[in-house]
Image: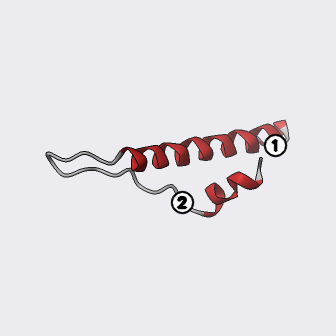
Amino acid sequence: SIEDKLNYLEQPIPPASIAPAGQQVAPEILAAHNAWIKGSKEIAGLMLMTMEPKIQ
């Protein structure tokens, strides 16, 4: 639902974690970052779909 995506509008996308040499980024951190990117793209798509064609 749209309410579930409000946090994507209110908060900036956190930067992707970069692990120091020889270490790995935890899978849950990568999954959270990817979910944030996906949610932001869904919001952008919803906004474009609801715009008047002449202002797109």
Callout 1, which amino acid? Met
Callout 2, which amino acid? Pro
Q: What's the CA distance linking mark 2 and mark 1?
A: 22 Å
Pick out the residue farthest to the right. 52
Q: Residue at x 81, y 43 (%)?
A: 51
Label 1 belongs to which residue? 51
Sequence-first tag of 2 and 1: 2
Label 2 belongs to which residue? 12
Residue 17 got which mark? none
* Vertical side of 46 occupied by 3: above or below: below
Instruction: Pinpoint residue 30: horizontal percent, then vertical percent.
Output: 41, 45
Question: Crowding near pointer 1: few (<14 within 10 Å), some, many (20+)?
Answer: few
* Vertical side of 35 occupied by 8: above or below: below
Question: Crowding near pointer 2: few (<14 within 10 Å), some, many (20+)?
Answer: few
- Relative placement, left or right, of 20 versus 13 is left
Which picture quadrant has residue 55? top right
Find numbered disc 2 in the image and state the secondary structure of the residue it sits on.
Answer: loop
Circle 2 or circle 1, nearest the eye: 2
Task: Tell me if label 2 and label 1 are in contact, CB under 8 Å.
Answer: no
